Amino acid sequence: MKTIFGGSSDIVFKHWNYGPELKHEACSIYYESLVQEDTVNYMKITLQDMVTHEIGPGMEVKPEEVRAFFEHDGVSGKKASVLADIERMVEHIANGRLVIFFDQWNKGLSFKAQSVETRQVSESVNESVVQGPRESTVENLQKNLGLLRLRLKTPKFKIVLLTAGGNTKTSVAYGYIEDVVDQEMLTEFKKRIEQIEEVEILETSYIEQLIEDSSYSPFPQHRYTERTDMAVAGMLAGKIAILVQGTGGILLCPGLFTEFFQSSEDYYQRTLISTLVRWLRIIAFIIALTLPSVYIALSTFHPELIPTVLLLAVLNAREGIPLPAFFEALLMEFFFELMREAGVRLPRPVGSAVSIVGALVIGDAAISAGIASPIMVIVVALTGIASFSIPQYNIAISLRILRFPLMVSAAVLGGFGMMICFLFILLHLCQLRTLGQPYLAPLAPFRWKELRDVLVRIPLKKLLHTPRDLHKRKPVN
């Protein structure tokens, strides 16, 4: 063990004696950076458990009594396991456990002694709601699994644990509800997830990229959530939840296109309000994707489609602007994306202030310098606000990517170029699969029974009574 762990300053080999006249030797091995100090005395507590009829620390216990106690019917105040394999002992020590060796015994005892400071369960930062539960996941895998178990008390909720990576030995867990998940989809998922065992996994997004169908697609094929209620709702709808030790988010597989417009608060509000808000998000998606390209196409190729009064206002605003509408939009979009990225990377107390002040100063300066027109600043600002209205951050990133090809096509061929670009996007969406499921389902292929929670959200008393065959469909090839 000294050869294996040699060179590490935080590894501790603590020798101590026990037995009659303290002539028998034992050694405790642990990482002091992972093990709490008061747990180092686990073995003395255990020795006292073996002689509960006597008063004292139990240091008179003989080695043969220790072997009999733990190998047969031993009971301790602290959970212990007997190990006979050196590799397993090394793995337990690396996971923050305390391993003890005794002379005259060719096995080791492993005690759970890990004590690392972790973030407490708090309100979700990225998925805040006005009405609904506040708890979110943390970086501790066992806590996250416990939060899910509290909400899913059925034995049909299955959790599978595995270890990934040769050096990181990251604990990965995935869960599903046995009679709800599609079995063919689950088989495909297991085939893909088995391939990650040799890969160093540091975060949930690693797994997303390893199991997704199309690595070069701009559209996300799985959903993220920090909310346990969203994760449970996803599993009740037939999803598979993936959790990783050290990561606060949960990956829901598969993620369909229509699901990225849904929020947990949709199901805590009344039907009419939820439906109107969902339509607002769809309109925001269209605005965030097309508004700059529509402005370029109308002002460059199709001015006859603009009302006369508005056209005169646009021409008056653009008077003296040296750049064409395309380069003007490209420049302002670049500035906006730069400020948004700076606001994310800067410390939180100053990040929002810098992004807001930067937008005001640069927008006003660009208008005063004659680089951009006021209408273009309004278009870029509306585009950014619309992208912030989408609940899922990863689908908003896709809009940031697709916005620029649409602007180029609008600058080259106007509305006709935009239609060609839209057709390519639609063809890509139609052929995209996620774990064998069509990405545009239930719109394409059309499944009218499942439309009750897509464009509208029907009342909960009808929505919660799910047809039993809804989650047992076969994937469309």
Image: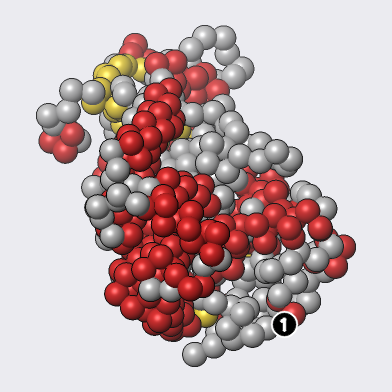
**Side (left or right) of 401 relative to 51:** left
Name the residue: 33% across, 13% down.
22
- Outermost residue to the right: 461
Name the residue: 84% across, 62% down.
459
How is the rendered protein coloured?
Answer: secondary structure
Vertical arrangement, residue 166 with respect to residue 106, above or below: below
Label 1: which secondary element = helix
Answer with the quarter of the image where residue 77 lies. top right
Towards the viewer: 397 or 416 = 416
Residue 454 percent coordinates (x, y): 68, 69
Residue 111 percent coordinates (x, y): 43, 32
Question: Mark 1 sits on what residue?
Answer: 448
Vertical arrangement, residue 193 with respect to residue 247, above or below: below
Towards the viewer: 386 or 349 = 386
The kind of residue on which mark 1 rests is Trp
In this rendering, the count of numbered labels is: 1
Towards the viewer: 453 or 146 = 453
Residue 318 percent coordinates (x, y): 37, 53
Answer with the quarter of the image where residue 298 lies. bottom left
Can residue 169 be seen? no
**Side (left or right) of 340 relative to 430:** left
Q: Residues within 10 Å of mark 1 (few under 14, many from 20)?
A: few
Name the residue: 36% across, 31% down.
361
Name the residue: 43% across, 23% down.
349
